[in-house]
Amino acid sequence: MFKKIIKGGHKKHSKSDSIDGSFHGYGLPGSGHPGSGSGSNSSVVVNYASRPGHNAKSSNPCPRTTLPPMFAVEPLPLFKDVAVSDRQNLFLRKLQICCFRLDFSNTLKLVREKEIKRQTLLELVDFIQSGSGKITERCQEEMIKMVAVNIFRCLPPASHENTGQEAKDPEDEEPYLEPSWPHLQIVYELLLRYIVSSDTDTKVAKKHIDHTFISKLIDLFGSEDPREREYLKMILHRIYGKFMVYRPLIRKAINNIFYRFIYETQRHSGIGELLEILGSIIHGFTLPMKEEHKLFLVRALIPLHKPKAVSVYHQQLSYCVVQFVEKDYKLADKVIRGLLKYWPMINCQKEVLFLGELEEVLEATQTAEFQRCIVPLFRQIARCLSSAHFQVSERALFLWNNEHIVGLVAHNRQVILPIIFEALERNIQHHWNETIHGLTANVLKMFLEMDAELFDECETRFEEKKAKARDVEEQREMIWEKLADAAAERGGDHMVTV
């Protein structure tokens, strides 16, 4: 029967040829048959040939016990019910069962097989977590193969890609939930327990958790299922902490995802989770900071403020940016100028987010860096102060509730007050919201107490500017009246008045 299956593996199967179209087997650990997986409808598909160095004929000189292949999901004895010497072979047999991927599109099909696989996966997790027996290198290799078989898959297209409709706001979209999550969750838990286990030898583990494995793992952050991304975040963070040799690879892969998101697709489900990992990584940076890390801030993190979907991941992004400034205060000028570069022009909710982040950055900013960007910064703040959207104006006025920022402003009031005085006065005279009137009055009072003389100078200039504007307006009206009179004299009855 096995020869017939292998022989027919390269031809198209009819429905009658396969055991069940919803039941697929993948490369079975210990089976010793590293064939090619060509048909998704065949009952057994062995796909390890695509992973060089992990087939049955490994360079490992140790003798290997060849287990017979399995063609069905059947329950196996519990670990506690077999002798200690037999547990490693039983571990491999259980891995074989877990290599069968079952179709979850129909919840009524293969219910028994799904439950057997789920229970088997739980047993494997318990076995790893309990530390009842240190698993051999071969078992570790086969376990990572089983994990790869289950988690590495083609992710379904996003809803807008599938239907051809215009992409919606990511905040308004319902996330796609992976139907096979009852199994996937336990596979991820097994991988996590293996990585964090004190029994796991890093030198052995990195033979199987290699560059290819990590790259594919990072690609899975594109999954729309938030439960899967949460597990991926925990696992990748643990890998980064335990396998120091992979740290540059992980940072570079995340970097590339950000570049592709910013400059090409502007759609990726896992930006927030990747930023959470980076927040922890940045927290561990040592001083003096490497030039590579500074370039990452300028080329990746700051441009991440540009996409429309920034509100989805802004909290994590803001944390990363502030971490950089707290680590090296000299970066404050670059960060503030970067925020000003990508400052939203018509999106008020985005402006409120930027003002919140700006306050956190200014809290970590020293006087010298503050003075470098003071003019463009307060020109933008002045525009926010006079915004017709009361939330933007209110959030800008709240900056004066921060003692550190008030201290910076007080030391540089000679430059700042002339820039923002007009916006504050116009708020008092013309803004429609009463709350804005009260907050503006408090800020003006603060400046008056800081430096009454400077306040009077700014007020005088403002009144002079208003008077000049009135004169210009009067002259303009006079010119239009003269033009109208001249046109009336020449055109007579043919003149059309509006």
Image (cartoon, rainbow, N blue to C red):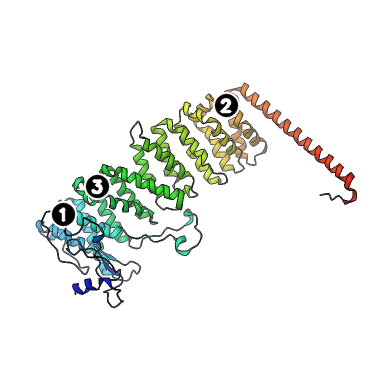
The quarter of the displayed image where residue 396 is located: top right
Could you tell me the amino acid type at mark 1? Ser
The quarter of the displayed image where residue 412 is located: top right
Please give left or right for residue 309 compared with residue 57 in the image: right
- Give the mark, 1 or 2, whose residue is nearer the N terminus: 1
Could you say where residue 474 lies in the image, as x and y percent from the top left? Answer: 78, 35
Viewer-side residue, 416 vs 27: 27
Dot in front, 1 or 2? 1
Tell me which residue sits at (62%, 42%) in the image: 388
Which secondary structure, mark 3? helix
Please give left or right for residue 349 compared with residue 117 in the image: right
Residue 128 shows which numbered tag? none
Within 10 Å of the Cα at label 2, are there few (<14), some (14-19), or many (20+) other Cα atoms?
some
Within 10 Å of the Cα at label 1, are there few (<14), some (14-19), or many (20+) other Cα atoms?
few
- Give the mark, 3 or 2, whose residue is nearer the N terminus: 3
Work out whether residue 334 can be spotted. yes
Within 10 Å of the Cα at label 3, are there few (<14), some (14-19), or many (20+) other Cα atoms?
some
The relative height of residue 353 versus residue 73 in the rendered view (above or below) is above
Residue at mark 3: 196
Could you tell me the amino acid type at mark 2? Val
Q: Farthest residue in the bottom direction?
A: 16
Residue at mark 1: 59
Could you say where residue 190 lies in the image, as x and y percent from the top left? Answer: 25, 54
Work out whether residue 355 can be spotted. no
Tell me which residue sits at (46%, 57%) in the image: 173
Could you say where residue 100 lies in the image, as x and y percent from the top left? Answer: 25, 65
Residue at mark 2: 415
Could you say where residue 323 lies in the image, as x and y percent from the top left? Answer: 40, 37
The Cα atoms of the two marked residues, 3 and 1, are separated by 27 Å
The relative height of residue 184 versus residue 420 in the rendered view (above or below) is below
The Cα atoms of the two marked residues, 1 and 2, are separated by 72 Å
The relative height of residue 429 versus residue 16 in the rendered view (above or below) is above
